Image (tube, helix red, strand yellow):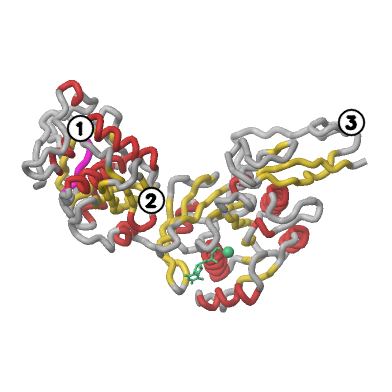
Amino acid sequence: MARATRSFVCQSCGAVYAKWAGKCEACDGWNCIVEETAGTAAAGAPPGRLGSGKGRRIEFAALSGTSEQPPRLVTSISEFDRVCGSGLVPGSALLIGGDPGIGKSTLLLQVAAALARSGIGCAYISGEEALDQVRLRAKRLGLEQTDVQLAAATSIRDIVATLEARDGPAVAVIDSIQTMWLDTVDSVPGTVTQVRASAQALIELAKRRGVTVLLVGHVTKEGTIAGPRVLEHMVDTVLYFEGERGHQFRILRAVKNRFGPTDEIGVFEMSDRGLTDVANPSALFLAERRGAVSGACVFAGVEGTRPVLVEIQALVAPSSFATPRHAVVGWDSGRLAMVIAVLEARCGVTIGPNDVYLNVAGGLRIAEPAADLAVAAALISSLADTPVPSDMVVFGEIGLGGEVRAVGQREARLKEAAKLGFRTALSPTIIAAAGQPAARPVGGINVDEIGHLSDLVARLRPPGRALGRTPDADERRRPYAPAGRRQGSYD
Ligand code: TYD
Ligand code: MG
């Protein structure tokens, strides 16, 4: 006789427990464990055992065989295509995760409309909104005349039967996977078991029929709805749609892609007529910059294959708390603590009794260690109340010894800075080839190479004011010793 197995599943990370608990030991989440009935076990076979039934023998194939690849489905929304790795792969499953209200439905409706315009059969199945609501959005986006097949449905059995039809669409958007349910699973929609089973059925259909499935998944901090993280290993591509709610910029980031690069980002601007591609993100991120202000510094970063210039803002102010506050938006707080510790220990800069606020302007999240030097420059600039020159970009990684380490894609960073009118770059020292000058100008930009963080402090120090001590020779020993380093000050 079939027997239902009961278990307690964490709705944010998918960990399974034998009994209920208030806290998930796997992800440290509170109140996220819910009782679920996880299907049925086959008669006579304990879970995990095969029982008496015989399996079929699998045919092995050689690696050298050729597989015909159908052309990718290009949406002509260039930022979306780039993040997917130059278009969607037919028969693949893609998951777009993001906070509620960030713009996932808007983006996918625009994607569906763009594909339909180029003659690709496209279905948009909404489990969250009524047909009228989706139509209203389409009207607002100016897409009401496109040939997207619209449906409001939540039953996976019905959806699979529809998509399986011979004249079914080539691309199907499922908005969202948390609202879908499979009648063979005895859990409410949105639980880990339902989300997994529904996604499994859709992914299986994608592989079998060559339908491209785009799944929307909400991420919730509370973990009350099954996060898309439990699906990440099942799908081919995982994209995250991020951005600050108050900003109009949205960033589409690939975190897993079986068919393309994973470090690409796509930048969009949300307007009253939907999302538009931002072809030159640097210009947009720097648009609101107000000249030379102390505590602000332009970081020449690289996101995927593209250089992106962004302003880093720091405010170092005397604290009114017993323990000073450190708050970070858009960067790693652990990394900030490291930069502060290196400034204190290796350069003698005292930040300790101050509150430190760090912000990456424009809502971008930076993960590159190359931002260390720009963060340090913004901190010192705020502490000393000396502006970093407004025509200067900064990049470089900082080691625990205070040494400034070389980072990749130097030329691309410098070229982008030159293109946007910057005249100087503060960058790590690179070991110059014999007969070449240590600091080579790239695209008309003057490169000032520094080897130690104390050189940065020296350059930003106001005249006649001590800002930390000068490290001795031992401390200054570093792997990238420049032959003829220029000492100078920007004051
Ligand atoms: P939506 O796509 O519904 O978000 P999600 O599916 O991720 O929950 O979009 C949410 C926000 O976008 C909503 O607050 C309104 C805003 N928006 C615009 O600013 N302009 C537009 O043209 C559209 C369609 C939405
Ligand atoms: Mg939505």
| Mark 3 vs ligand 2: CB below 8 Å | no
Report which residue position mark 1 lands on.
348
Query: Can residue 115 be seen in this snapshot?
Result: no
Please report whichever mark, 2 or 3, sits nearer to the chain's N-terminal start: 3
Name the quarter showing ligand 2: bottom right
Q: Is residue 464 above or below residue 364?
A: above
**What's the magenta region?**
424-432
Q: Regarding mark 1 in the picture, which secondary structure is present there?
A: loop
Q: Position of residue 396 (x, y in %)?
A: 27, 39
Picture quadrant of residue 368: top left
| Amino acid at pointer 1 | Gly
User: With 368 as the anchor, is 99 left or right in this view?
Assistant: right
Residue at x-position 34% and y-position 52%: 360
Q: Residue furthest right?
A: 1
Q: Is residue 153 magenta?
A: no
Report which residue position mark 3 lands on.
52
Q: Position of residue 256 (x, y in %)?
A: 52, 45
Viewer-side residue, 482 vs 29: 29
Q: Is residue 19 above or below residue 208?
A: above
Query: Can residue 367 be seen in this snapshot?
Result: yes
| Amino acid at pointer 3 | Ser
CA gap between label 2 and label 3 equals: 58 Å
CA gap between label 3 and label 1 equals: 73 Å
Report which residue position mark 2 lands on.
329
User: With 372 as the anchor, is 277 left or right in this view?
Assistant: right
| Amino acid at pointer 2 | Val
Q: Looking at the image, do the residues carrying marks 2 and 3 touch, with CB atoms under 8 Å apart?
A: no
CA gap between label 1 and label 2 equals: 26 Å
User: With 471 as the anchor, is 58 left or right in this view?
Assistant: right
Residue at x-position 47% and y-position 45%: 262
Q: Is residue 123 above or below residue 39?
A: below
